[in-house]
Image (cartoon, rainbow, N blue to C red):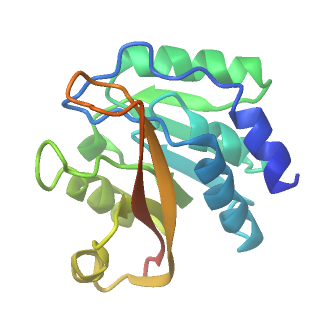
């Protein structure tokens, strides 16, 4: 499936109905989700088992399944988000397991993690448990972080290594009361991390 086709399908998905500020619930924009997933697909990282940590409404998990991943599991601690994710998977006719779980309780091992963890804008270090869980349970990780996170991520993930990184645009629609603009574009960094071992 071409990247543009994937993007168009992902644009059909329902977003958070009532996002939680403390959980930093921002849906991964469909163009960015399609770009990351297509890159992972081209690297051969979506051919087996895939998990989406903090899957929210399921956009990355569903996209991975659309690109042919054999088994996809989406984990989230918010039951409302998982309800939307299940509806979204049904809408596109894909089978994804959605599991209500705290990020620290995940033990099942998969080949690849795709995730858009909280950036830690509200609570510093919010992305760390997601990285720790991914490092513990997968061989390859694709993760989205605030621009300027490279040095921290490199240090945090050792002995795992970043094999690829690039800057991308992440448009955020006005979601919460403190947002001044209808749409703000921030720059993020996408990392592909290879877990050693």
> Which residue is at 74% across, 18% downward?
91
Location of residue 75 in the rendering, given as x and y in whole percent from the top left corner: 43, 36
Q: In the rendered view, does 19 fall on the left or right side of 58?
A: left
| Of residues 83 and 33, the one drawn nearer to the viewer in this rendering | 33
Please state, as top left, top right, bottom left or bottom right, where the C terminus lies in the image: bottom left
Res 32 seen here: yes
Q: Residue at x 73, y 70 (%)?
A: 44
Q: 190 or 76: nearer the eye? A: 190
Q: In which quarter of the image is residue 133?
A: bottom left
Position in image of residue 73 (x %, y %): 55, 39
Q: Name the one closer to the observer, 59 or 173.
A: 173
At horizontal 35% and vertical 49% (from top left) the residue drawn is: 117
As drawn, 127 above or below 85: below
The residue lying furthest to the right in this view is: 1
Depicted 46 relative to depicted 101: above or below: below
Is 165 left, or right, of 132 in this rendering?
A: right
- Whether residue 197 is visible here, answered yes or no, is no
Horizontal side of 73 relative to 68 (left or right) equals left
- Tally the marks: 0
Direction from residue 79 to residue 153 in the image, left or right: left
Give coordinates of residue 115: x percent, y percent. 46, 51
Task: Report the residue at 30% width, 53% height from top.
Answer: 130
Q: Is residue 182 shown above or below 125?
A: above
Question: Where is residue 11 drawn, in percent x and y?
Answer: 69, 32
Furthest-left residue in this view: 124
């Amino acid at each position: 499936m071409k990247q543009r086709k994937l993007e168009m399908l992902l644009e059909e998905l329902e977003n958070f109905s009532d996002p939680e500020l403390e959980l930093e619930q921002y849906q991964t924009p469909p163009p960015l989700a399609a770009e990351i997933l297509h890159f992972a697909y081209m690297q051969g990282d979506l051919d087996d088992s895939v998990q989406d940590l903090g899957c929210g409404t399921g956009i990355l998990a569903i996209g991975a399944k659309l690109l042919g991943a054999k088994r996809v599991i989406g984990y989230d601690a918010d039951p409302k988000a998982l309800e939307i994710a299940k509806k979204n998977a049904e809408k596109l006719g894909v089978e994804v397991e959605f599991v209500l779980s705290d990020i620290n309780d995940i033990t099942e091992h998969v080949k690849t993690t795709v995730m858009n963890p909280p950036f830690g804008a509200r609570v510093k270090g919010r992305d760390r448990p997601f990285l720790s869980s991914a490092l513990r349970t997968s061989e390859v990780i694709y993760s989205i972080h605030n621009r300027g996170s490279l040095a921290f991520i490199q240090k945090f993930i050792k002995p795992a290594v970043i094999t690829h990184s690039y800057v991308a645009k992440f448009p955020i629609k006005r979601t919460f009361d403190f947002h001044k603009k209808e749409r703000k574009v921030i720059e993020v960094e996408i990392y592909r991390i290879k877990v050693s071992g």
